[in-house]
Image: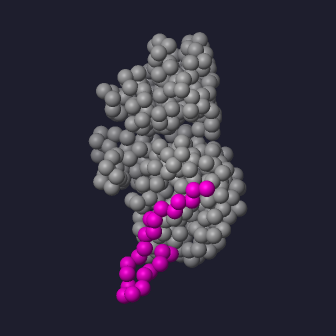
């Protein structure tokens, strides 16, 4: 098992011959290798940009690679809880990995800040999921934007195709309920696997249902698979995507066939077009520019989930420290409660307001309708 611990320990200032040890321990699990590395690499990178201190407390980030394996995610979680006694965990990169960790973070009563695609890690709320905070905008927020875009364009019937995993299932549940309320009918429901090279059979079924539009719930490059299939089969309706497709790899794989598609995603995808009125603009640009300076390229949206997790913790840690000392069970409980009290936090993906029943917290202020124009993402202004 690869348990490569990457040196990213953030220490306090030197005092004479001694060193002030980190007072808060945060474990980070990212898929820096394996099939999900296209997500996990930017998440691992983002740790270098996280706050070094929160109030008067310094922070130590302990980073591990789960190699995209859900079993390793669980093993690392147990290790961080039992041996390192971390105060919180950021991660993992994959939705199935996160679902497998729920039981153990709940038993360990340790907050998990999960930068994953599925809302199933926090909904419906229960005794396990109350320890989890999802650090990307919820399906409800993005779905609302998709439905609004469809209504504005007169869409009455929709064919749905999503990943055959928790991300796809969560999206089908979300969009089905929203579509019904908007008098939009879901006329087809298909799935594809992340590693599929084509989705010909599913595409033919979608076209046979004669929808006005198709919604694809995929992630990065794999979202282009059903899209290009629809294009090759001559589908003439509009094709919509979730924010999972808002990555350079989606455009790289899809090429000209994905031109004109509509995607609802965070403003950080188009940093040069963010209006001054956006309350998160300053923090979005700080993340984008800092990441580009450090790693030579603009960050994918996946890294933003880790960056925003760090911002949430930096606000919650000083509050929790008023009740208990880091490293104690009492501090972890207080930290979970403090995270539920995060209000009006301007983060890289928008503004966060956490409540006991909403552990995502992002609202529409960080959401934007995008399209692909001349091989680049651009804001749709309508």
Q: Say if 366 sits above or below 156 in the image.
A: below
Residue 381: percent from left, percent from top = 33, 30
Taking the spot 63% from the left edge, 24% from the top edge, the residue there is 189
Q: Say if 318 sits above or below 359 in the image.
A: below
Front-most of residues 202 and 158: 202
Question: Which corner quadrant of the image does residue 259 belong to?
Answer: top left
Kindly tell me whether residue 178 is visible in this rendering. no
Which is the main secondary structure of the residues drawn in magenta?
Answer: loop
Taking the spot 34% from the left edge, 40% from the top edge, the residue there is 270
Kindly tell me whether residue 48 is visible in this rendering. yes
In the picture provided, is 373 more to the left or to the right than 155? left
Q: Is residue 10 magenta?
A: yes
In the picture provided, is 3 more to the left or to the right than 106? left
Quarter that holds the N terminus: bottom right
Taking the spot 57% from the left edge, 47% from the top edge, the residue there is 68
Taking the spot 37% from the left edge, 87% from the top edge, the residue there is 16
Quarter that holds the C terminus: top left
Residue 194: percent from left, percent from top = 56, 34
Q: Which residues are magenta?
A: 1-23
Q: Say if 86 sits above or below 205 in the image.
A: below
Front-most of residues 149 and 214: 214
Residue 267: percent from left, percent from top = 38, 42
Q: Is residue 271 magenta?
A: no
Residue 75: percent from left, percent from top = 65, 58
Residue farthest along the bottom direction in this orientation: 16
How was this image coloured? one colour
């Amino acid at each position: 098992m690869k348990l490569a611990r990457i040196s990213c320990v953030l220490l306090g200032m030197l005092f004479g011959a001694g060193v002030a040890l980190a007072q808060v321990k945060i474990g980070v699990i990212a898929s820096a290798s394996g099939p999900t590395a296209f997500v996990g690499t930017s998440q691992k990178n983002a740790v270098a940009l996280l706050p070094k201190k929160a109030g008067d407390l310094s922070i130590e980030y302990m980073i591990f690679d789960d190699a995209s394996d859900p079993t390793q995610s669980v093993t690392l979680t147990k290790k961080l809880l039992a041996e390192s006694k971390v105060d919180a965990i950021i991660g993992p990169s994959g939705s199935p990995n996160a679902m497998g960790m729920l039981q153990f973070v709940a038993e360990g009563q340790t907050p998990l800040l999960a930068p994953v695609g599925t809302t199933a890690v926090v909904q419906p709320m229960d005794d396990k999921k109350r320890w989890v905070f999802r650090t990307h905008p919820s399906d409800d927020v993005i779905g609302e934007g998709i439905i609004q875009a469809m209504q504005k364009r007169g869409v009455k019937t929709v064919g749905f195709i999503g990943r055959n995993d928790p991300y796809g299932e969560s999206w089908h549940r979300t969009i089905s309920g929203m579509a019904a309320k908007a008098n939009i009918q879901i006329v087809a429901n298909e799935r594809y696997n992340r590693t599929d090279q084509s989705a010909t059979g599913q595409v033919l079924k979608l076209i046979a249902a004669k929808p006005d539009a198709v919604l694809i719930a995929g992630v990065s490059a794999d979202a282009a698979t059903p899209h290009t299939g629809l294009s090759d089969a001559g589908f003439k309706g509009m094709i919509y995507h979730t924010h999972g497709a808002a990555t350079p790899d989606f455009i790289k794989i899809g090429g000209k066939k994905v031109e004109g598609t509509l995607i609802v995603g965070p403003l950080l995808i188009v940093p040069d077009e963010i209006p001054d009125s956006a309350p998160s603009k300053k923090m979005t640009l700080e993340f984008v520019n800092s990441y580009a300076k450090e790693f030579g390229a603009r960050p994918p949206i996946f890294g933003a989930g880790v960056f925003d997790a760090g911002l949430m913790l930096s606000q919650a840690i000083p509050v929790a420290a008023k009740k208990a000392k880091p490293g104690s069970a009492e501090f972890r409980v207080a930290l979970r409660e403090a995270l539920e009290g995060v209000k009006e936090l301007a983060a890289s993906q928008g503004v966060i307001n956490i409540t006991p029943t909403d552990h995502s917290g992002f609202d529409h202020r960080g959401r934007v309708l995008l399209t692909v124009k001349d091989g680049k993402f651009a804001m749709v202004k309508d």
